[in-house]
Structure formats: structure tokens, C-alpha cells
Amino acid sequence: MKYLVMVQGTQADYEAMRGNGSAHSPAWSEKELQAMFAFMGQLNDDLAETGEFVDGQGLVEPARTRLVTGGGDGRPVISDGPYGETKELLAGYWVLDCASLERVTEIAERITQCPAPAGAPVHPVVIRPIDDSGCQV
């Protein structure tokens, strides 16, 4: 079965990765960034080797995104950012083809071990099975 495995973050987290720390998220050093990239690269390589990796991407910061909704008058309403009501958002994802929910949960547990600076916020890893019943959205 295929699963969508999602990591979350905030604009403050993206700023921190550029060295601009805040009360929410401490600044990352170049060494810490490289450790995170190495961890993610190794994870992707391992998943490709087992045949479970289908796709995975990091997403750009919320400040560079747009939210488009239908307005009351039938015209679209365009807003900055992906979500108006929340600061946490999808920061990256994997599409994995795993034998079981238990296996994809093991992978999510591994993702939570990604290196980060001391005091960095801990965001959840979300697992969603992908509906392969043929129903199109």
C-alpha cells in the first residue's frame, strides 16, 4: 500500500535554517544543516534500496506560497501563505510503498530522529494511507 508521510514546520523554522533564529526556533549552523541534509539523503537512499521510495520532496517556505479559495461573489480570493488559520504547514513529504502501516510507522519513527539544533521545535510526522481504489479527486 502507498502512504503519504508528511513532516510539518513553520515559517520560523525556515528562517532558523537560514541562520535567523527566534524564540520559536533557534538558528541552525551550517554544520547542523549539512547533518540534516545528510540524514535525509541517507534515508532516501535506504528507502530507494528497499524499493519503498516512490517520491519525496522538501517544500519551499510559506512566505513564497499562495492560498486560492472561492470567494462569496464567485471570484477567487488569493492570500499569501498556504493556510490562513495555522502557522504549521507541510514542510516536506515522501510517498512510500510499504507492506504495512507498521513498516511505514517504523520509517516515520526514523524521520523523527533527524538532527536539529538543541531547542528546535519538534513537529509531528503524519502518515496518511493513499486511497488506491481508483476514486479520483
Image (tube, rainbow, N blue to C red):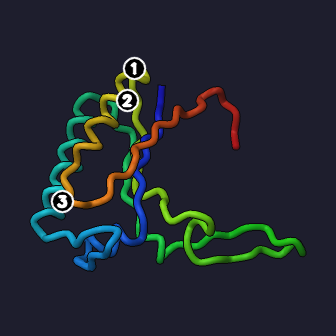
Quick one: SS at disc 2?
Answer: helix
Q: Which is nearer the eye, 25 or 40?
A: 25
Q: Is residue 98 left or right of residue 74?
A: left
Which of the 4 image quarters holds residue 52? top left
Mark-to-mark CA distance, 3 and 2: 27 Å
When the figure is inspected, residue 134 is found, relative to residue 9, above or below; the finding is: above
Q: Is residue 137 left or right of residue 101?
A: right
Badge 1 marks a residue whose secondary structure is: loop
Q: Check disc 1 and report the residue beneath it.
A: 99
Instruction: State the residue position of label 3.
Output: 118
Of the residues shown, which amino acid type is indicated by label 2? Val
Name the residue located 29 percent from the left edge and 43 percent from the top edge: 112
**Relative image position of residue 105 (x, y in whole percent):** 37, 29
Give the side of residue 67 with respect to residue 53, left or right: right
Badge 2 density bin: few <14, some 14–19, many ≥20, Cα 10 Å: many
What amino acid does circle 1 point to? Ala
119 versus 2 height, above or below: below
Q: Say which residue label 2 marks.
A: 104
Determine whether 96 is above or below 8 in the image.
above
User: Which is closer to the viewer, label 1 or label 3?
Assistant: 3
- Residues tagged 1 and 2 counted as in contact (Cβ below 8 A): no
